[in-house]
Image: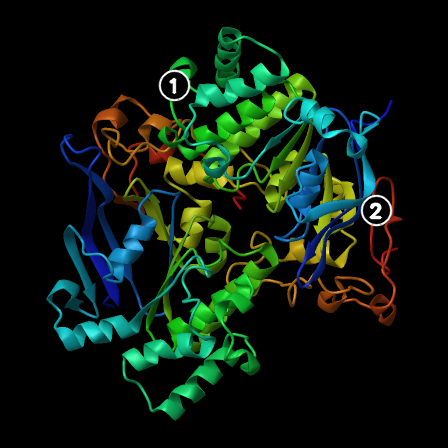
Amino acid sequence: MAPLIEIRGLSTQFRLPGGVLKAVESVDLTLEAGETLALVGESGCGKSITAASIMRLVPPPGRIVAGSILFKGVDLLQLSAEEMRGIRGNRIAMVFQDPMTSLNPVFTIGNQVAEGLRIHRDLSRDQAEREAVEILSQVGIPAPRERLRDYPHQLSGGMRQRVMIAMALSCRPELVIADEPTTALDVTIQAQILELLDRLKEETRMGLILITHNLGIVAERAHRTAIMYAGQIVEMAETSELFSNPLHPYTRGLLASLPEFGAPGEKLSTIAGSVPDLKSELVGCPFRERCPICLEACATHAPGMKEAGAGHAVRCLRAP
Amino acid sequence: MTALLSANNLVKQFPVQDGLFTPQRRLTAVAGIDLELFAGETLGLAGESGCGKSTVARLLTGLTPATQGSIRYAGQELSKMDRSQLARFRKEVQMIFQDPFSSLNPRMRVSEIIAEPLAIHRIGSAAERRQRVASLMERVGLSGDQLHRFPHEFSGGQRQRIGIARALAVSPKLIIADEPVSALDLSIQAQIINLLQELKGELGLCFLFITHDLSVLKHLSDRIAIMYLGRIVETGSRDDVLSRQLHPYTEALLSAIPSVDTRKPRRRVIARGELPSPLSPPTGCPFHPRCPYAEELCGTVRPELIEKESGHLAACHFSGRIYRSPSSF
């Protein structure tokens, strides 16, 4: 059986006045139905652009320049704009980070949740409204019928994020991409939203790509994890394997710098320097200037992904 | 020992007007808190958005006048200070802000930004200021050739370093840092935490560290105070609050933090529902609608913040019932 989604050699670039920014560089990913894959990295590492590429919503002047994105065997990059509209929001849905800017402030909640249903499932106004109430109550919104008439500003941050999830799930998608779905929320509300996503995933067997920079969330929720750095996936493995046996120096550095692991009052371990400019022509390994174990060869050889155990791949010359 | 800075029954209310003809209401952001900060210590103030922790920072620095209560700095009442005393207070108490993108003037060069407090307080000659700026830049880990650049040419972590250098310029005694690392990437966060920790040791600074991230507080603070809906619900030494918590809100907050170490025994206590609006706070204990231990009493009588164990205070009727995780994070 073909995987739910299979990305091969995806590259997305932005043509800017100062040069070509390689936001995503030959990314390979697969995801099975019912699986949660975490995409982890710091700001600017390309995780959100990877998501936008899957949705074919890369903002201009960005362009997907190479690769294929097979969704149940069909290459999304070969579809016409109209065919893609039939999939986007219907079979593949997205939950965005900031519900305040991604909900339309001048339409009611009911209007926005029902919109997808009316477009994709061809429901009448009444049917769509009944369905919307059903979905809102599924995501744990109290008194959903009354909420239909509310505008986004009348809801709290946690409730707005539930509305976003309800909109994403309204057409029973097979794949949901959640881009930092809880970053704008408080920890006690974050815990509720993550429980909700997990429960809904159990019920519908949808695949979930979870984009986050919070390693704690990853450890607790994801089956597999891909670590991104400077537009590339640098390490990918089952989550428990990745956390117990990190191989890439960047992954190791990230884990070691967590305050959770430091003894109180002691110095935290850090990764020196900062992310390279993706507009410049990068030769060799993009991490080498911050790398504690880099070799001379790292300056000239860009490492490829290599297998380092069952389902564990890493992009590093020093990896075993 | 007398406190460097202390607040007594501090209250801040904001008027809220819903519409032209509706009666004005009052939002109580800070509902009577007591705080003491001693020289050389770091107090961590934690809580979720809207709990009033940033308002506390603004009250303590004198940026916002309090509705009620008093603030004393070095034995002197803030509201009764004369001009020269106020000038000294404003020199010795500095702030570091959360967002390094909006707290630096985009039209000023870094050298000007860092030298501005020196100019305001009329410290040193022009040459001395230049020297001071250069040594501050070096101390916070910026190179001297970046002196004449503008804020937009720096990354988030570097901008936060500029903010720290500016706060240090006038040799303060107390630094109030409002979420100084929450806008930064993980690998940069650790760098800034280390820098603050070093500076504290070197300069004997006193810190009030405001954050929602308890794992950062675990690392930096000597004492911790937890706020909920404008009140301090628990306070004590770092270890007391983080591993022997006495308030169910602290417990929920700690157990909601996703942990990388999944082998640790954990018990999830999920706080039900959401933060109530500070415009209409619940009767009795402000946490009772979300509390797993709440009983009838909690809905009617608000528990006072009292000392339950030596130096460890909590505002809860049933703090004895709280499960104490043996290996809390």
- Comparing A19 with B83, the one in front is A19
Q: Position of residue A203 (x, y in %)?
A: 64, 17
Is B311 left or right of A279, judged from the image as shown?
left
Q: Position of residue B228 (x, y in %)?
A: 33, 41
Residue shown at the point (56%, 36%) measured from the top left: A96
**Residue type marked 1:** Arg
Q: What secondary structure is found at the residue carrying circle 1?
A: loop
Tell me the quarter of the picture where residue B291 sits.
Answer: top left
Is B87 left or right of B134, judged from the image as shown?
left
Are labels 2 and 1 on one chain? yes
**Residue type marked 2:** Ala
Residue shown at the point (45%, 47%) measured from the top left: B242
Colouring scheme applied when the structure was drawn: rainbow
For label 2, the crowd category at 10 Å Cα-Cα, with few meaning under 14, some 14 to 19 and many 20 or more, is many
Residue bearing the label numbered 2 = A313
Residue shown at the point (57%, 20%) measured from the top left: A116
Up the image or down, B154 lies above or below A55; here it is below
Is B300 left or right of B117, judged from the image as shown?
left
Q: Position of residue A154 (x, y in %)?
A: 36, 29
Residue bearing the label numbered 1 = A149
Dividing the image into 4 quarters, which one contains the N terminus of chain B?
A: bottom left
- Comparing B309 with A166, the one in front is A166
Q: What secondary structure is found at the residue carrying circle 2?
A: strand
Up the image or down, A186 lies above or below B33; here it is above
Tell me the quarter of the picture where residue A186 sits.
Answer: top left
Residue B178 — which label?
A: none
Subunit bearing disc 2: A
- Comparing A212 with B237, the one in front is A212
Subunit bearing disc 1: A
CB atoms at circles 2 and 1 under 8 Å apart? no
